[in-house]
Image: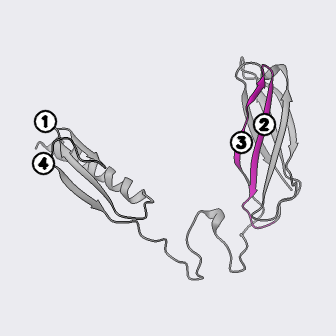
Amino acid sequence: MTRRGRSTSHCVWLVAGAIAAGSTLAAAQTFYKWTDERGTVHFSDAPPPQSNGVEVRNLPPPPAAPAKADGVTEGKPEDSATDAGRKEGPARVVILSRRSPRTGPTTMHIEGKVKNVGGEAAQNVSVTINVADSGQGNPCLSQDVTVTPANLPPGQSGDFKVDLESPCLNGEPSLDVALAWD
């Protein structure tokens, strides 16, 4: 094998290892490595049609998340909690989902879901929908929409929806949704 081939093979193994390390499978997984007649190294979760020179590898299951001293397991920042079971920090509202189906040539129905992932209540939660025209990209519409419920305690979700009609919605306009709260 040439020096380049070894280097490529090592890189491929590193990539395969990184993918395996990031995997969230609960059990061990088997994968297969082989080199074809042109010298290309392949990895697959299924064996190749010919079975000469195939290496079979078993990946161990990922380790369990380590427990913190207070018994809370590691997670995303918005999932961490204090010993009182509350989120930490000020209110922080994020968009969980958004849909904007077209209902006509110049009309759209926009709806979505938001959630307070902070530690304090978010008051008067709203979204501002900004639209730029499809031709020049110039701002042409701005619409404030109240979230229901408008006050979100930590961990609570709310919804927004609005039907918009404007000539600037013609074509493929650029649509942005911005959050605001007290």
Residue indicated by mark 3: 98
Q: Secondary structure at mark 4?
A: loop
Of callouts 1 and 4, which one flags the residue occurring earlier in the amino acid sequence?
Answer: 1
Residue 39 in the image: above or below residue 74: above
Of callouts 4 and 2, which one flags the residue occurring earlier in the amino acid sequence?
Answer: 4
Near mark 1 (Cα within 10 A), the count class, few <14, some 14-19 or many ≥20, is: few
- Gap in angstroms between the C-alphas marked 4 and 2: 56 Å
Residue indicated by mark 2: 110
Magenta span: predominant SS is: strand
- Gap in angstroms between the C-alphas marked 1 and 2: 54 Å
Q: Residue 61 location, x and y as percent?
A: 37, 66
Residue indicated by mark 4: 53
Q: Residue 65 location, x and y as percent?
A: 49, 71
Q: Amino acid at mark 2?
A: Ile
Q: Which quarter of the image is occupied by the N terminus?
A: top left
In magenta, the rendered stretch is 96-120
Residue indicated by mark 1: 37
Q: Secondary structure at mark 2?
A: strand
